Image: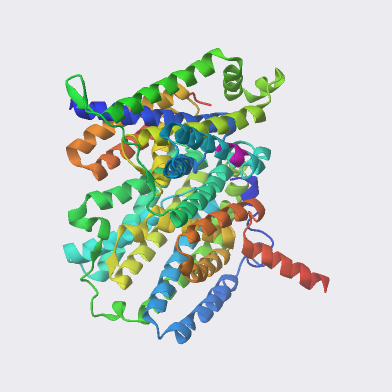
Amino acid sequence: MTASILDGIVLGLQFGLLATGLTLMYGLGGILNLAYGQMAVVSAIVTVSIMEAGLPVVPAAAIGIAVGALLGFVLDQTVFRPLYSLRGEARVLLSLLLSLGVALMIDGFLNWLFPLKGLSLFIGGGAIDVFGEPMRRGSLLASGITIVAMGGLVAFFRFTTLGRAVRSVIEDEEGARLVGIDPRKMLRLILLLSGGIAGLVALTRSMVAPVDVTAGFGITVFALIVTVVGGLGSITGALAAGIILGVINAIAASAIGTFMSLVILLVAAAVTILVRPAGLLGVKE
Amino acid sequence: MTDRFSQASGTSAVGGVERRSTRSWSGVAWPTLGVGAILALVPLWLGDSRVMMGIAVLGLAFAAYTIAFNLIFGSTGQLFLCVGALAGIGGYGGAILADVVGLPIVVSIALSTSAAALAGGLLSWVAVRRSLGVIFTGIVTLIFALTFENLLLGLGELTGGESGFLMEAGRGTFLRSQIPPYYLMLGMVLLTLFVYGSLRRSRFGWAFRALRDDEVAAELAGIDVARYRIFAATIGAAILGLAGALLAFTEGRVSPTTFGFAEVDVVVLVMLAFGGIGSFLGPILGALTFTVIDELLVEVGQLRVFIYGALVIALFLWLPRGVVPALDDLLRRRRAGS
């Protein structure tokens, strides 16, 4: 039981961080990015390709994350550009359809060019005891990196002027515009940031389990569920929901098998949406 | 619904029927019969090949899916991302009822179609009750679709898990022969098309258009938006269930990929976007066009997915009304000009 909970927390931390990227894009720009998981996969594949070319893991990982961020920026400048002339639900709907197209393009391209390729960062060394349970070093390192990244994100949004500017746009776009903040610039920043987050999560995830070319859709779905349960647009909600769902998933998986645990997770998400459409910590509009 | 997509039906021959007389049934019956007459000739051309006939049957099933999705999404603005799952309730339901429970085939199909209709109606009822909006309806139905997929995989003893199962029922009957299943499926598609066309011309059609253009105004004009939405979703889901069940019985096997999200929902979305959201004959033209394109692209393997993605983007960016209505407009202008 303790082992399952710890595994769940490891997974939950990562999905919490992953979901913050999705929730920021939605909260700030009304963009529901279904290509999010594919952005993570691109980072993973770039990293493993560079490592195969002979570079050490740290610079390869840094380049992988940078490519993820760059992909976010490119999407903002190209495919998502026509979205910004739309408002409200129309924008969300079109963003969903366009990003689905992007997801298919990336999936098809990667599966065609690198079938069977996947990133698996193996962290050597023996297990370390945590609360009497042996934990793999890879899981601990992944969790450590994730927690540091989360801390960095929270600090960025709480203490820096830029982070506060982003939050002000989420709260009231018109108000932010009036005090001289350009929402488009903030959105560009967030797409860059979320691409980087997706890349980082792909790397930490690969320390626990391989991330291969077909993983994109699964990552997107998980991030979407966590985001919706946590409340679209809420960063703390995403982090909390990630950990809660991660633990539920791990306990259910060890008790009744993978597929049925996913069913439980999905039903839990559906119930949350129906009981509290704004999510656990979301604010009703 | 949104401004971008609400212009979908309207002035074109393919795109809408408002211009012509709204009374007579002939405006629905003739196009339906025309489509039927052309498609009835397909076996003369491809009838020798079992593989090609299988693809043709699958194409017809997708035509029915696309018409149903058009009724639910195009006409009443409910983004149902569980087309494959609802068809799967029909397919797996029919297969299990006939093979495991041992009911007659016709009864199995009727029961599983009703089950799909009930599921679709319930989903719509929940969405309307909780006033979920387009996006949350999409998310909830996506969750429903994924739950269905994982249930298929998780309940392996009943469903055969990842590989599905071969069906005993219908073996040795006309359902497994080469050409008759095609005409069975074609009959179902034509019935579907006729039902959809008739609905468009009835007071339901007026209500659909009103609530798509402006939901609040429709509500104020005395249209019971909730009732029409649930009605459309129930009929649409029944069509999906029936098409899924017929596909299962003619193929003689069911598997999760036959009704998967990536294999069905994504493709149906492309077909509808191509044919024109909200149009009458667009969905069937879109479905048939893409069945052919899909066959032509078999050689390029995974690049096919890439091309689909590029098409989705291009269609929604530059031709949000659909290729078929746009071509139709172009032809009209030509004719008017000459």
Q: Is residue B73 above or below residue B54?
A: above
Q: Is residue B77 visible?
A: no
Task: Based on the picture, tell me whether residue A235 belongs to the magenta stretch.
Answer: no
In the image, B116: left or right of A47? left
| Image quarter of residue B252 | bottom left
In the image, A129: left or right of B303? left
Q: Identify the image's colour scheme: rainbow, by chain, secondary structure or one colour.
A: rainbow
Of residues A19 and B190, which is closer to you in this image?
A: A19
Of residues A139 and B32, which is closer to you in this image?
A: A139
Q: Is residue B205 above or below residue A182?
A: below
Q: Is residue A47 visible?
A: yes
x, y percent for residue B166: 23, 67
Q: Is residue A36 above or below residue B60?
A: above
x, y percent for residue B95: 25, 64
The residue sitting at 57% across, 42% down in the picture is: A95
Q: Main secondary structure of the magenta part?
A: helix
The residue sitting at 44% across, 54% down in the picture is: A111
Of residues B97 and B293, which is closer to you in this image?
A: B293
Q: Residue furthest front?
A: A54
Q: How many marks?
A: 0
Of residues A123 and A1, which is closer to you in this image?
A: A123
Q: Residue furthest right?
A: B338
In the image, A239: left or right of B71? left
The residue sitting at 59% across, 44% down in the picture is: B218
In the image, A230: left or right of B170? right
Q: Is residue B269 above or below residue B59?
A: above
Give the extent of the magenta segment.
A72-76
Q: Which quadrant holds the N terminus of chain A?
A: top left
x, y percent for residue A185: 66, 28
x, y percent for residue A225: 40, 36
